[in-house]
Image (cartoon, rainbow, N blue to C red):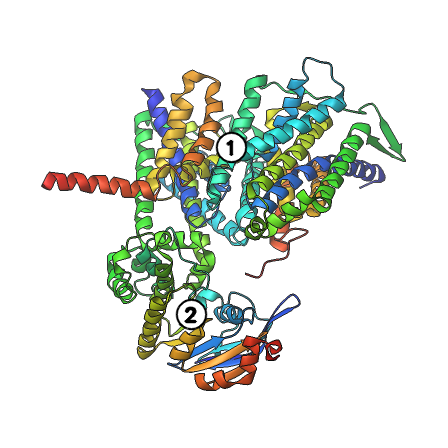
Amino acid sequence: MLELQGLTKHFGGVRAVEKVDLSVAQGEILGLIGPNGSGKSTIVNLICGLFPLTDGRVLLHGTDISDLPPHARVTLGIARTFQNIRLFGQLTVWQNLWVAQNSGEQFGQENFLRRWLGGSRRARGEIDRTLEFFDLAHKSDELAANLAFGEQRRLEFARALAAKPSLVLLDEPAAGMNAEEIDQLDRRIRMLRDDGVTILLIEHHVELVMSVADRIAVLNFGQKIAEGAPADVQANPLVREAYLGTATAA
Amino acid sequence: MDFYLGLIQIIGVHTLLGLSAYCVLHTGQVSLAQAGFFAVGAYVAGMLTVLAHWPIVPALLVAGVVAGSLACAVGFPALRVKGLMLVVATAAFGEAVRLFFFNFNYQLERGGFHIGPHGGEGFRQIRYFPEYGWSTLEVAAFIWVVVVLTMAALWWMDRSRAGAVLRAVGEDEVAAQSSGINVTVVKVSAMTVGGVIAGIGGGIFAHYTTHIEHIQFGIVLATFAVAYPILGGLSNVFGTLIAVIFIQGFLIEGLRFMGDWRNLLFGGLIVLAMNVRPRGLIDAGTITLVKRLVFRSKERASA
Amino acid sequence: MDFLDLIDALQSLADGVLFGATYALLGIGFTLIFGVMHKINLSFAAASIGAAYASLLILAGVKAPPALVFLAAAGCGGVIGGLVYLIGFRFIPLANPLATLMSTVGLLLLIDEIIVHTTAGVPLNYPALFSDVIIRAGPFNLRGDLMFVFLLGCLCMVLLLMLLYRTRLGLATRAMSQQPVAAELCGISNTKVNILTFVTTGIVGGIAGAMIGAAIGMLSPLLSLPLTVKGLIVTVIGGLGSIPGAIIAGLLVGGLENLFQYWRGVSERDLYIMLLLFVFLVFRPGGLFAPATARD
């Protein structure tokens, strides 16, 4: 459903991402791994439209979305989380989801005014279900800034789902989590996939990616060096080299 | 009695001015252009009633629409910049509006008198209220009807999804974009709503003072406009009202007996308030506290 | 436009550029504080005027030479700068930009009112240096006092740049402006750098205040608001955080302002400066020297 063609991004002289081709199939979990500074987060930002592309194209269901602003891409079904959590801290937990909910409506559409100026009751049911799924229902009226770290990570994920996306980009969702929380995350990602949501998982935690991803792509220095089933990627000498460095052979 | 009615009128008009900055501040934008929109509203409404003999209500509505359209037009280029740049850009816009009226001449001759805006001398004799025999009490009541309606509308907005979206944009624009919000549209809309409110407020101001001139709409007024909601807190509309009462009622009128020391105290108290309550006099914590107190007394009553 | 007009226009442009040195110093003050703390100190111009006032009052009894008055203004500026930091910034959470914005507005009003209170609002004469010297260059006259103001301004800028680029304090300041957390981890005290920045900018402001007093020939509390606006405009046109930008923008604004005054009169003068700002905001929103945009 999502296809990156020759995706390139230069920051001044730095080639953060160089001619990356990648495609994500409907309903799969694609893991994207790579050492620090290999361009993983940049790719997420490019898919979301936060930076203009230097070169290449981003296609969603075959249409070129390279020039669309970020909010329009969300309307088309791409939602994301942030590596360094970016919640609306002074809003309550459920308001964070409310903001993201039906964000795609156009002016003049049916119920437009009611959705914007109507009270909270109408939106509540759906949001409560999402919060339940992420075990945040009891914190619903808490300010997002007052949540514990793990809860904030879950809220990020929940907010991304509130926009009812068909593709979710998870940017290091396991960073800073303990083993139990990672297990829960693993379970939730699988459940979403079973619900038909496509997931692009960018992660440092190799174990999680290996266990949950259907396919894995590996980046190094802004270029894709491997792609395939988890086991194949693990066995790939280029990947080992990227992670361990060539010097360690001695 | 008239003194208090006059004070009530001042508080009402300044509340409108503060509320116009309140909705813009929600989106994280500090706009010093509100005094400019206020000035546009004042001149437009004044000219409509004095030169074109319109009744007050349609004149105010048109003043609001004109100021709002101007705010919308300014919003697009101005909101490309953020933070300090926006403060300076909007302050410069406000000053430009003031200087425009400083040089603005549009006088008609009526029965041997020249009426209408006259450059640096200002716009005198906006005598709609006295001409139609409104008493001070009636004028004050009229002002407060407008204030209450505006506050109710903003209170409603605060509790709707629109309010949450405005705050979300103010908190983190990137996250808001990534949640599917068109940040430009939201910011320009907030600016437009702020412009409409400021325009109506300015129109009322012109009519109860009966004499306006450019110097009244300077950077000081613009600063007051953002000071009210910041000082009062952005968690709800009453913060702005309380800050206006605190500044206009208590600091400016209430402390008049202190003479010239009052002004010293004024700046000092603002600094002190920001040191003690950086999120405003009424913040989210205060509301929770009030809720808790109310609930507790209810529980006690039922027990 | 005939030849004489052209001469007059050039003359006012030159006078304006010379006076623009004061705007440049004000712009540097705003820009430095913004660079280090990412905060606006709206009380800066008022504090500068306040420092010039303080220097007059301190030396009111003795018949001090003007040079001493200037030094005193610089010293008072430093002290006021430190106080502004302590009162308006030190105890306010920096994560909330509105709070410090408001506290500096409060300080601006406070400083203005202290001035009005102590001087009963009467403008005071300020000593000028070399006001009787007039340098003739062809058809142009360069006023000695303005030349002095200009040269003093240039000297300040050179000293400031040396301070920033040749000393450890400057290094620490620049480190802090780029990566506050990393700088702190390297043993640079955040508070100390901040307070030193405020004192330094305060000294610059004090000198600017004295220069304005000397160039206009008097001080009035009515100066502080227009100067705040001008200083901010200079900061934005120069590019936030850029010192060379502030210098060039200051001279530019000073020169054009005088030129517009010559052409269109004093009541329309500032209107064109605002238009100039809008032109910049639309076509070069980053200012003359926009700092490189960060990656994230």
Asked if the residue at tag 1 contacts the one at tag 2, i.e. Cβ–Cβ closer than 8 Å, the answer is no
Left or right: residue C73 versus residue B148 is: right
At a point 50% along the width and 83% down the height, the residue shown is A227
Q: Name above or below for residue B158 compared with residue A239.
A: above
A17 sits left or right of C17 in the view: left
Q: Which of the 4 quarters of the picture holds residue A237?
A: bottom right
Q: Indicate the position of residue C90 as horizontal and vertical percent values.
A: 51, 37
In the image, residue A65 sits, relative to residue B182, either above or below, namely below
Few, some or many C-alpha atoms within 10 Å of disc 1 (few <14, some 14-19, many ≥20)?
A: some
Location of the N terminus of chain A (image quadrant): bottom left
Q: Is residue C98 above or below residue C52?
A: below
Disc 1 residue type (three-letter) = Ile
Query: Can the viewer see residue A88 in this picture?
Result: yes
Which image quarter: residue C159? Answer: top right
Residue appearing at x 80%, y 39% in the figure:
C10
Judging from the image, mark 2 belongs to the subunit labelled A
The disc label shown at residue A170, or none: 2
**Label 1 sits on residue:** C87
Q: Amino acid at mark 2?
A: Leu
Seen from the viewer's position, the closer of residues C93 and C120 is C93
Taking the image as drawn, is residue C252 in sight?
no
Q: Secondary structure at mark 2?
A: strand
Secondary structure beneath label 1: helix
Asked where in the image residue C160 lies, by quadrant, the reply is top right
In this image, B280 relative to C124: left or right?
A: left
